[in-house]
Amino acid sequence: MANNYRNGTSNRSSLAKTDRPLSVNSNSKPAVKSKSFPASGPRKSSPASLGSAAVAKDYAGVPGRVRVAVRLRTRNAEEMVADADFGDCVELLPELKRLKLRKNNWDAETYEFDEVLTEFASQKRVYQAVAKPVVESVLDGYNGTVMAYGQTGTGKTYTLGPLGEEDPATRGIMVRAMEDILAGVSLDTDSVTVSYLQLYMETIQDLLDPTNDNISIAEDPKTGDVSLPGATLVEIRDQHSFVELLKLGEAHRFAANTKLNTESSRSHAILMVHVKRSVEGRDVAHSGEIGNNSHMVKTLKPPIVRKAKLVVVDLAGSERIDKSGSEGHTLEEAKSINLSLSALGKCINSLAEGSAYVPVRDSKLTRLLRDSFGGTARTSLVITIGPSPRHRGETASTILFGQRAMKVENMLKLKEEFDYKSLARRLDIQLDKLIAEHERQQKAFENEIERITIEAQNQISETERNYADALEKERLKYQKDYMESIKKLEERWKINQQKQGSDRIMVRSEDDCSDVASNAKGSMASIVGELTEVKKLLLKETQLRKAAEEEVNNLKIQVAQWKRSEMLEDEAHQKKKLEEEIALLQSQLLQISFEADETRRRLDRGESGKIPGGLDSLTQVRQPQLKDAGNGEKASIAKLFEQVGLQKILSLLEAEDADVQIHAVKVVANLAAEESNQEKIVEAGGLTSLLMLLGSSEDETIHRVAAGAIANLAMNETNQELIMTQGGIGLLSTTAANAEDPQTLRMVAGAIANLCGNDKLQLKLRGEGGIKALLGMVRCGHPDVLAQVARGIANFAKCESRASTQGTKTGRSLLIDDGALPWIVQNSNNEASPIRRHIELALCHLAQHEVNAKDMISGGALWELVRISRDCSREDIRTLAHRTLTSSPAFQAEMRRLRIDY
Ligand code: ADP
Ligand code: MG
């Protein structure tokens, strides 16, 4: 290996050899210029990266040099005998963290390391010095690497591998690291998964699944993250299962090596531990409470997870393979066996020298360890050496490797990201809950209607019964009165009869008494009179009774009617209220499902960072289709759509409740962002409703969202004409004049900018004040608004230029007529590139027609055109400006006059 170093032993001055007097302070590292590596991980001693929250804000990274410890093995039985007459080739000075390598009896070289571990160092001490800081880093969200390098038989596997089942004190780094990891995570929210692999002759084999013997390495082209998608990943929940897994891996490794006729000392063993932790305290309330839906929708934020990877590498023996093939390999095989290790040496050389090119891609090992050296991981290397003077050469080469590695600087970076998957899961659950709640309310509504109907029926029959009773009572009373009257009459009749009888007798006995006769005549007359009277009374009574009965009947009918109408009114009112509630819930459901869908889509695209912001994503730039959305979401949206219906949603735009209206317009805007919905929305009258909302609503949110939806719909030519015929320019202009919010202005400007790109609408648009409205919005000064204004002007200028070329337009540009030129000139070198680009194009279009030249020259546009033709970073615009300038006689003349050399 030593021969592979360009700066080998012959040029040691650049190495960490210390010939000058050594500092007494054992912490100082005179040989190493780079910042010293904190002794115990970022949590304890590095002020720059103390708490995890502090680190979370600092995505720029923390410098972290590769830390190197050297470990000396005791003499083994063979060495005791064979080297009995010789001293060890090395001498350790652990307090000074130095190692002396004897050259001969009188000369030695001294090297300094981060840690010097003597033959008496316990496994525990080795773990604490070498691996513990890395493990702590991994728990904090940084990648980490622990690697053992050294000649075969010097203790690499002893340092990393022992399970310590018989003697716990012998436990190696792998087992101890997992113990600390399991103690540091909470398995309710975090996860630990493990892969175990062997790399031999540039082939990666899965030690957890021997049939999987050619795993390929995948690299994320964006982040450069390296992964092994084919490797078995086992979730670890306790120490015991991890130990069993290591045993299984070892057994497979032994079997594989027997089969391939290799020694394990020729292969690299790689353990990968993936730790995924959710960050507490960042997860803003996800109250699943129903009834607080709108609030809930606003506060949903994806939780944050830290994903870190610990890689433990037991490298192949560093001794050179005898190239004669004494191990039964051909020369080619020998090269291939050595390839990864020598590539690692070359990479570390390049990194240590700070050279621009690091040959990472030369081998699988260096590709896998790309993050460990010169990357973002915290890396700790333990180099193992033996004491025997017979292996002095290999020992020296190992020491030099370690010295080189100490010069490698990594930039530690926190691996923190939004957990969109869990957010999507949570949204799914909430969606289900809302659907269930909706069903429950629907059911309750139906039950309520049923209850009211039954109650009403009961009341009606009870009223009917009451009236029947009352009527019967009345009838009986009248009957009784009638009978009594009849009785009285009969009695009086009887009395009269009797009176009449006695009178007749008297008439017969006193025949000739004329007084009596006249008396009798008189009493007859009075009886007849009385009878008539009684008859009259009877008649009157009968009439009265009839009238009373009629009255009662009328009353009865009236009361029944009154009762029914009162109940109906009540019912209608209740129904309306419930319907409104349902509509509100449905619109919220739809919105949530859209957001869930959006989230899923971003997730699938692997985006991170910004949370899908519903309306914020409503730019005039068309949103991608939901093609890659999960089928589950699609189905639930389709279901909701079916349930709610576009007509219903559109009708909610006119709802009286402002909340409902806002929700409805948001839903419509979300739908309008999808090209596939636009035709349906317009067909169902949605565009008209949205335009009307601009005019009728006072609410800024509604203005913003409606304008956004109109901007999206205005991307289609047919819709553009529709907007114009429905007085859209007037409405948009009024909104533009009244709005303060830059986002509203951006949406309005975006809508008008789209209209500006329609050749057919030029005159009408300008005639109805579209250009003036556009220019009016620059008062806001927000770059997003200015970019839309510039886009509109460029669109307009392009259409105009086209019309002029075709001869359908003559005369000066309407843009110049409407006073746009000063703003154009003023912003043609705006520092925001979207604004600048549009304006540059607009200027080129205007300049193409000689009629505009005079105004452009007097307005200062010529200077800008010259500048564009010289400095514009886009070649096509530069060429266009140049062509325009050279073909215009007016510009040419002016430039000659100004002595502009062109
Ligand atoms: P390598 O993996 O580097 O080839 P091993 O770890 O297999 O070396 O060690 C070779 C032998 O030396 C093993 O028998 C191991 O038990 C023993 N050994 C290595 N280092 C030590 C140590 N520090 N203390 C005791 N025995 C050791
Ligand atoms: Mg080994």
Image (cartoon, rainbow, N blue to C red):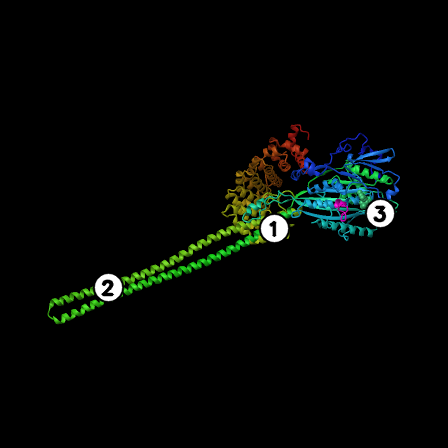
Indicate left or right for 129 with 735 as reference. Answer: right
Front position in the image: 603 or 365: 365
Front position in the image: 792 or 783: 783
Residue range highlighted in magenta: 161-174
The tag earlier along the polypeptide, 1 or 3, is: 3
The tag earlier along the polypeptide, 2 or 1, is: 1
Q: Can I make out residue 370 in this image? A: no
The verdict on label 2 being within 8 Å of ligand 2 is: no
**Label 1 sits on residue:** 428
Indicate left or right for 858 with 309 as reference. Answer: left
Real-space CA distance between mark 2 and mark 3, rounded to the nearest whole angstrom: 143 Å
Front position in the image: 561 or 264: 264
The tag earlier along the polypeptide, 2 or 3, is: 3
Secondary structure beneath dot 2 equals helix
Badge 2 vs badge 1, beta-carbon distance below 8 Å = no
Q: Which mark is residue 534?
A: 2
Q: Which marked residue is nearer to the observer: mark 2 or mark 1?
A: 1
Quadrant containing the C terminus is top right
Q: Residue 791: where, in percent of width, then height?
A: 61, 39
Q: Residue 838: where, in percent of width, then height?
A: 63, 38
Quadrant in which ligand 1 is drawn: top right
Q: Can I make out residue 185 in this image? A: yes
The verdict on label 1 being within 8 Å of ligand 2 is: no
**Residue 859 against residue 553 in the figure, above or below:** above
- Which quadrant holds residue 890? top right
Secondary structure beneath dot 1 equals helix
**Label 3 sits on residue:** 333
